[in-house]
Amino acid sequence: MFKRITIKSMKQHECINLNEEINKIILESEIKEGFIIINNPHSTAGLYINSYMDPLTLEDITDTLKTLVPTRIDFHHQFDTPSDAAGHIKSVLVGNNETIIIHDSKLMLGRSQGLIFAEFDGPRSREIFVNIQGDK
Amino acid sequence: MKNKMALDQLLSLGDLFTNSFLEIDNRLRYLLDAKISVGIKRVIVIGDGDSYHAAVSSTSLFNKFTDIDYLALPAMKFLAYEHDYVKNYSPGQTLLVGVSASGGSKRVVQCLEKAKANMPWTITLALTGNVNSPVANAAALVFNCSIPSIASAPGIRSYVASMFGLSSIAFRISELHYINHMTKLNGIRKQISELGKSVDNLVNMSLKEVQNIKDFSSSGFIMTCGTGNNFGSALFFAAKFVEIGGILAVADDIEEWLHVGRFSYPIESPLFIIAPKSTSYSHAIELAIEAKKIGHPVYLITNVKDVKEKSINYTIQIPFDLDDSLFQLVSFIPSIALAINASDKLDRKMFQSDNEEISIGRNELNSRLKESM
């Protein structure tokens, strides 16, 4: 089963927890055992799994990514903006897709883990592709 | 049809939007990069004739989309009155844009050369359709705004190309200064490039609509009015009435006309007002009422639907849902249809090209002037 999730980021850098949305899709699919592939098709955003319990953890991750990849004016990629160029690199560092086990109709993540959509050049309208495979 | 060159250009405008805007915009992205753009705090645009009109027409774009100061000046005014008083910003904070479609405007060349010599802290950029021209050679950066050639005169397509170039500069500074996100600006860029079909429709509609307007060709004098960027369109309107129709036409600011222009004769001279739906519309209606009371036939060029004001003799609709800051890209179109129609009625050739004394050209005029001194 294929699904699209639409996201509207509101800031240049933003972390959005997708757990609730993904769990809803799993329930709709009626798949009990299997796996889910989540893909971010944007090259200036990322997808990762990490703790969302304390939102400041996500802020730390974002701050560190910003430190690692400052928005410079000497990027080779000049067609768009320096923020866009930096976003491409952050996206590569974080990655763009995740595969997660579904067990008993739920995402098999750690207690504090969230599937995080990371915006690196917002605000923008984004979408996430989801494919679920398994047994009902 | 004596003015086929003007008509051919008019009929090809849609294609220009479809095929040239994004190409010109893309050329700028590689020229005005982040390193150059990041420090810019002021843009001064200089030009003569249509190039100056394009600079004035682009005022609202820079005001609305960027965080920089914008100044549009006739080249001679910059040379004679402004150059010595331009405040000395830090290096790289002033962008001086010399606009010349042909690349041959002498005053623009002089402006760029003088700026390079006396204002070394300024970034000079030639916005031109000819990259191997004196204007291009006089600037540090050359923004190639060339378009497929149909006719070099009167400047209609080249006026649009200059406005495209200036729009692109405004959008580029806006996204590189993070005033607007590039996705929003890319949306506006796409909107402009997709205007082609609507522009074709407007051209055909304008050519038909001029038949509905009472013949004004014999009035001998025409006034055009607009405010802000629409003052640039009013200047261009007037220029085309002069060049194509051979009719004396003068552009004025709406408020200035209400203060001063209304005292002028002949009172039967037509008044063309350019006003989109928000910024200057109510002001334009005030002007229409006053002008009609005095005795002027009043024509309104607007994108307001169902204009009910009775003082207006005829409304030329621009059926576009465009932001006011972009209205200049299309609002000039009826002026060409009106000027062609007037010149046909008067059986005149554009630029008085059948008058030997007029058509001798500027160079010969200059040499005659030297001989007489």
Image (tube, coloured by chain):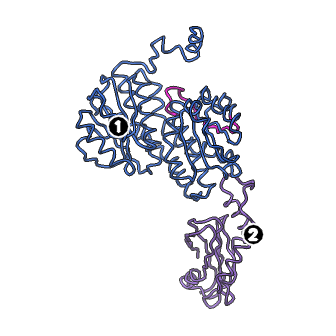
Crowding near pointer 2: few (<14 within 10 Å), some, many (20+)? few
Chain under numbered label 2: A
User: What is the three-letter code of the residue carrying label 1?
Assistant: Trp
Is residue B180 rendered magenta in the image?
A: no
Callout 1: SS: helix
Give the quarter of the figure containing the N terminus of chain B.
Answer: top left
Crowding near pointer 1: few (<14 within 10 Å), some, many (20+)? many
Callout 2: SS: helix
Residue B158 position within the rendered picture, expressed as x and y whole percent measured from the top left: 54, 33
Determine the main secondary structure of the stretch shown in magenta. loop
Q: Which residues are magenta?
A: B139-158
Which numbered tag is attached to residue A67? 2
Q: Which chain is in blue here?
A: B
Give the farthest residue toward the top.
B371
Residue drawn at 56 percent across, 33 percent down: B81
Picture layout, residue A33 above or below residue B205: below
| Image-quadrant location for residue B263 | top left
Give the farthest residue toward the right.
A68
On whether disc 1 and disc 2 are found on a single subunit, the reply is: no
Chain under numbered label 1: B
Residue drawn at 68 percent across, 29 percent down: B132
Residue B203 position within the rendered picture, expressed as x and y whole percent measured from the top left: 41, 37
Q: Quick one: B105 or A100, which is closer to the camera?
A: B105
Q: Quick one: B198 or B226, which is closer to the camera?
A: B226
User: What is the three-letter code of the residue carrying label 2?
Assistant: Thr
Picture layout, residue B110 above or below residue B362: below
* Chain A shade in the render: purple
